[in-house]
Amino acid sequence: MAEPLRICITGGAGQIAYSLLYSICKGDVFGSNQPLTLLLLDIQPMMAVFGRCSDGTAGLCLFLCYKVDIVSTADPKIAFKNIDVAILVGAMPRKEGMERKDLLKANAKIFVEQGKALNEVAKKTVKVLVVGNPANTNCMVAQLNAPSIPATNFTCLTRLDMNRAKAQIASRLGTRVEQVKNVIIWGNHSSTQYPDVNHGVVDLGNGPVSIREAVKDDNWLNGDFVKTVQKRGAAIIAARKLSSAMSAAKAICDHMRDWWFGTPEGEIVSMGVVSDGSYGLPQGIVYSYPLTIGPNHKWEIKQDLDH
Ligand code: NAD
Ligand code: LMR
């Protein structure tokens, strides 16, 4: 039997985690025959929530997955001990009228503390995905506080933006999201990001064609499409009075599965990673680039794309 993977999810009692646990236990991310130890970290006042939910979560895990053990704790040093994967969700969400950067004061200190704890007790091979907003900046904060872990092991979530962009194109063309490939998110998980369809393709039944050729409406692609993706998070908050949860959980699963198992041949995905200076960006900032991911969880920035 394979050794259990140790996976920590922070904000384990929050709304994204509530949607995320199901898919992870079901095997959507690490495979359904992979035993897991799930370490759920939240703040002390939320431990009562874990107490109330743990029977349900444990039952769900046993039902869905080969084998899952669950540990819930308010201590980052317990949650991060010898972990293979850290999914850092736990942070304050924004409210209507706020930009994600307005959360920095409340949330950056969480990532200072958690970066230090990862540095001290996680495996040096740990793969870290930062979700809590502002995700790029928090990722950089955690990475700078964990100097003993390679910077390439830190990523942040822009897959939600990529999924949103693909959904816009699919809906415009009346096709399925799976038929839309290689849409890129450049930059920050914020309203300054650039969703780029210029290297993307769509298969409407006769093989892949460029998205621009299929859509035949550059005004829409250069205007409303870009703005809709950039502002989608705010539109969801306006509608739900809560920020996205199920779609965020789905994007986390997509990001982690591709990081774990690699990208399909010919496909690129977008993740926030620590810049090596590619495309003229300053080294060290966390920036969403187009990547391919090979075996052994090694990602590479796709180079030389016109942009
Ligand atoms: P939520 O309020 O429902 O849950 C957050 C949880 O984190 C709470 O249970 C809270 O107690 C916990 N928490 C707070 N401080 C913590 C700490 N120091 N350690 C561990 N847990 C802690 O919020 P949510 O809707 O699950 O969103 C979480 C974060 O994810 C927010 O910052 C939100 O803006 C962000 N988000 C990012 C993306 C993305 O694409 N990058 C998408 C959606 C949401
Ligand atoms: C999103 O894009 O849905 C999340 O980042 C939540 C938010 O604040 O918009």
Image (spheres, grey):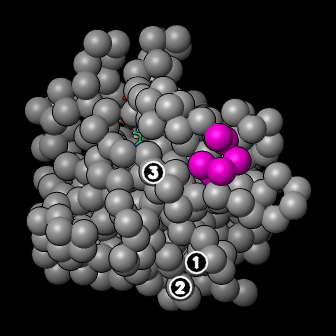
Q: How many marks?
A: 3
Q: Is residue 125 above or below residue 238?
A: below
Q: Amino acid at mark 1?
A: Gly
Query: Alpha-carbon distance for marks 1 and 2?
Result: 5 Å
Q: Quadrant of the C terminus?
A: bottom left
> Closer to the observer: label 2 or label 3?
3
- Which numbered disc, 3 or 1, marks the residue that appears first in the sequence? 3
Query: Alpha-carbon distance for marks 2 and 3?
Result: 23 Å
How far across and down, in percent of the image, does residue 214 sit? 70, 47
- Which numbered disc, 1 or 2, marks the residue that appears first in the sequence? 1
Q: Secondary structure at mark 2?
A: loop
Residue at the location (11% across, 32% down)? 105
What residue does disc 3 label?
Answer: 196
Residue at the location (45% across, 71% down)? 291
Q: Quadrant of the N terminus?
A: bottom right
Q: Residues within 10 Å of mark 3 (few under 14, many from 20)?
A: some
**Residue 240, magenta (yes or no):** no
Q: Amino acid at mark 2?
A: Gly
The boundaries of the magenta stretch are 211-216
Q: Amino acid at mark 3?
A: Asp
What residue does disc 2 label?
Answer: 294
Q: Residues within 10 Å of mark 2 (few under 14, many from 20)?
A: some
Query: Alpha-carbon distance for marks 3 and 1?
Result: 22 Å
Q: Which mark is residue 262?
A: 1
Q: Quadrant of ligand 1?
A: top left
Q: Considering the whole magenta stretch, tell me its main secondary structure.
A: helix
Q: Would residue 286 appear left or right of 213 to someone viewing this image?
A: left
How far across and down, in percent of the image, does residue 208 sit? 74, 63
Q: Is residue 5 above or below residue 52?
A: below
Residue at the location (65% across, 51% down)? 213
> Closer to the observer: label 3 or label 1?
3
Evaluate if marks 1 and 2 touch, with contact meaning CB atoms under 8 Å apart.
yes
